[in-house]
Image (tube, rainbow, N blue to C red):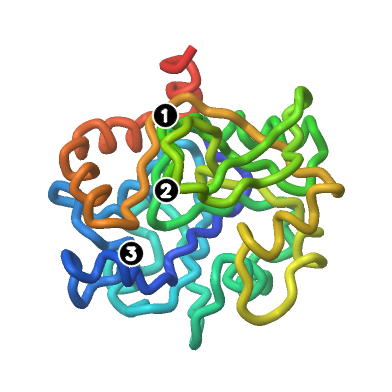
Amino acid sequence: MSTTLEIPALLLVGGMGTRLRSVLKSRPKPLAAVGTKSFLSLLVRQLRNQGIRRVVMCSGYLSEQIESEFGDGRDWDMEIQYSRETQPLGTGGAVKFAERLLNEAPEFLAMNGDSFVELDLGQLVQVHREEKSLVTMAVVPVDNAVRYGTVKIDSNRRVIGFTEKTGSDAPGLINAGVYVFGRSIFEHIPSGASSLERDIFPTILHLGVVAFEQPGMFIDIGTPEDYARAQAICDRLSAAASRARGDAARRND
C-alpha cells in the first residue's frame, strides 16, 4: 500500500443525478452499482491506495445512504467526515461549505463523485506545488468531446479559456473533475450555490490555473449510456482504482 499523501480530499457527492433516474431509482448517483460495488467505492479505494487518509464527503441528496455505506471511514483505514448540504449548492458552493472541515489545510484535493480518471494523485499534487498555482486541474484528451466543454491551454500548461459544448464530434481536452486547490480559493467562491466550472474557474484564470494532462481511462456516469459503459469496463475500473501511487504514471509512460 502507498505511503500517506498528506493532503485532505473533498468528494463532491451531493448531486441529484436527474439524468440517471430512469436506471437508478431511490439511490444517490455516486452509489450506483458498478459490478458488485458502488461507483463511489471505486473513488474511495483510489484515494486510499494512493495514500489519502482524510476525506470529506460533500453530501446532499439521500446523504444518509452514503453515510450508512462509508461511516466514519475506519473500515477503509481512513477518516471520513461529511459536509451535509440542506439545499443544493452546486460544485462551487459545496467546496465553500466544506471549508470549516479542512482545519486550515494549505491545499486540498477535490473530486467529482460521478466520474473516474486514471491518474497519479502524487504527481498532480507535485505539479501544483511546483507551479505554485491556485488551481491544478486534471484534464484528459477525448476523441469525441460532444458531451463536454473543452479546456484551452497554452504552451506552459496554463488554462486560458473554456469552450462550451458545441454539439460537434471533434476531439479535445476536457476537465476530468479532479483538482488541487490552494486554500486561498475560498476567497474567490461566494457563499451559496455556485458552479466551479461555470461561475468560478472562468473568473480566476489570471490568478493561475494549471492543467495536468493524463492519458489514462476516464468515464463519468452521468447518463444511462455512460453508466452502461461503466458496467462493461468494471474490471478495468476496479484494477485502476487498486493501483498505488506511481503505478498509474508508470503504466501510462
Residue furthest left in the image: 36
Above or below, 156 relative to 15: above
| Label 3 – label 1 distance at C-alpha | 35 Å
Q: Are marks 3 and 1 in contact (CB under 8 Å)?
A: no
Q: Nearer the viewer, residue 7 or 179?
A: 179
Disc 1 element: loop
Above or below, 211 relative to 38: above
Q: Nearer the viewer, residue 155 or 31?
A: 155
Disc 2 element: loop
Residue furthest right in the image: 206
Q: Which residue is mark 3?
A: 70
Q: Compare marks 3 and 1 and give the one earlier in the sequence.
A: 3
Residue 109 falls left or right of residue 76: right
Above or below, 69 relative to 121: below
Query: What residue is at 65 percent from the left and 81 percent from the top?
Result: 192
**Residue type, label 3:** Phe
Q: Which residue is mark 1?
A: 143
